[in-house]
Amino acid sequence: MMARRARGFTLVEVLVALAILAVALAAASRAAGLMADSSVALRERLLAGWVAQNRLAELRARRAWPNPGRHEGEAEQAGLRLVWRETVSPTPNVAFRRVEISVAAAGHEGTVLAQVTGYLARGE
């Protein structure tokens, strides 16, 4: 009589399946971590852009006519401390000034998160 052969997976097959599963889970975990990091960076760039746009809007609303040169300041947006630097330069038309505002995280001034360029008109 032929012995009845047991059906099922061998130990080698189970180990190969577990190895494949472990690699897939590690890749998924890494992808989730990268997404979390990029969402934090995106949030910082968004808030920095708002600070730059707010600064330019403030200059326009006050009808400011700043002297050419560099000006710096700090702002806080959604609990994030940011440092802005504006560079004012003359244009060929004396009725306009070019304003370039760059924003970085406080303590990391070398890494610009956002930059906005605008023009101010002299009020008559």
Image (cartoon, grey):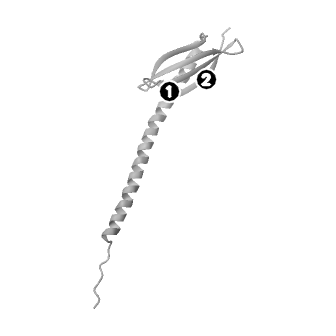
Q: Is mark 1 on a helix, strand or loop?
A: helix
Compared with residue 13, is residue 37 higher up or lower down, i.e. above or below?
above
Horizontal side, residue 18 vs residue 95: left or right: left
Disc nearer the start of the sequence (2/1) = 1
**Residue 100 at x, y percent in the picture:** 59, 21
Q: Residues within 10 Å of mark 2 (few under 14, many from 20)?
A: some
Name the quadrant of the N terminus.
bottom left
Compared with residue 76, is residue 123 higher up or lower down, i.e. above or below?
above
Residue located farthest toward the top when viewing the structure as drawn: 124
The residue that appears at 47% across and 31% down in the rendered structure is 44
Q: Is mark 2 on a helix, strand or loop?
A: strand
Q: Residues within 10 Å of mark 1 (few under 14, many from 20)?
A: many
**Residue 114 at x, y percent in the picture:** 53, 28
Q: Find disc 2 in the rendering and name its residue.
A: 117
The residue that appears at 55% across and 14% down in the rendered structure is 70
**Residue 90 at x, y percent in the picture:** 66, 14
Q: How far apart are marks 2 and 1 (CA)?
A: 14 Å
Name the quadrant of the C terminus.
top right
Closer-to-camera residue (116/121):
116
Horizontal side, residue 68 vs residue 72: left or right: right
Compared with residue 122, is residue 11 higher up or lower down, i.e. above or below?
below
Horizontal side, residue 14 vs residue 40: left or right: left
Tag 2: amino acid? Thr
Tag 1: amino acid? Ala
Q: Find disc 1 in the rendering and name its residue.
A: 48
Q: Where, by quadrant of the figure, is residue 12 drawn?
A: bottom left
Q: How many labels does the image show?
A: 2
**Residue 18 at x, y percent in the picture:** 34, 61
